[in-house]
Image: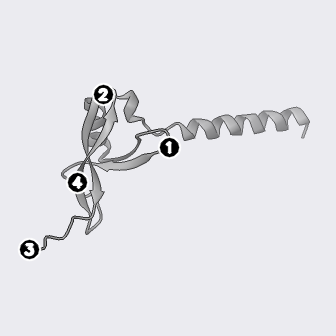
């Protein structure tokens, strides 16, 4: 295989790999309504929330969380301020005082 074809294939693979890395939606670039609509339409989605942070967010009512986890309120940064969303967490035990 000529060196030109090898270089072209390598460059194409690098471009493809970087495009896939950027595929996760970023909450900073969306409004709160857009973020919430995306979660509702996909039922569960992994969103970028910072330079090196991401998390899986789910609908409030659905079966996207495995037991014993349940949808709990969380806030993510959005283009128009803080946005309320839900993520799967284990509920705190209810122990009487």
How far apart are the two marked residues, 4 and 2, measured between alpha carbons? 21 Å
Residue placed at 29% from the left, 26% from the top? 80
User: Mark 3 near mark 1, Cβ–Cβ under 8 Å?
Assistant: no
Q: In the depicted view, which residue is nearer to us: 21 or 92?
A: 92
Left or right for 74, reference 16: left
Element carrying mark 1: loop
Q: Which residue is mark 1?
A: 52
In-image side of 17 versus 93 (left or right): right
Name the secondary structure under disc 4. strand
Marks 1 and 2: CB-CB under 8 Å? no
Q: Quadrant where the C terminus lies?
A: bottom left
Q: Which residue is mark 4?
A: 72
Of label 3 and label 1, which has the lower sequence position? 1
Query: For the residue carrying disc 4, how many other residues have a C-alpha within 10 Å: few (<14), some (14-19), or many (20+)?
Result: some
Which residue is disc 2 drawn over?
Answer: 31
Q: Earlier in the sequence, mark 1 or mark 4?
A: 1
Extreme residue in the left direction: 97
Q: CA distance from mark 1 to mark 4?
A: 22 Å
Q: Callout 2: helix, strand or loop?
A: loop
Check whether the beta carbons of the residues at disc 1 and disc 4 lie within 8 A of each other. no
Q: Circle 3 — which element? A: loop
Q: How is the image coloured?
A: one colour
Q: Which residue is mark 3?
A: 96
């Amino acid at each position: 295989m000529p060196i030109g074809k090898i270089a072209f294939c390598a460059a194409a693979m690098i471009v493809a790999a970087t495009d896939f890395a950027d595929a996760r939606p970023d909450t900073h670039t969306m409004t709160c309504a857009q973020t919430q609509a995306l979660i509702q339409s996909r039922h569960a989605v992994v969103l970028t929330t910072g330079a090196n942070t991401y998390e899986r967010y789910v609908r409030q009512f659905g079966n996207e969380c495995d037991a014993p986890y349940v949808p709990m309120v969380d806030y993510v940064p959005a283009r128009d301020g803080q946005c309320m969303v839900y993520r799967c967490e284990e509920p705190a035990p209810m122990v009487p005082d």
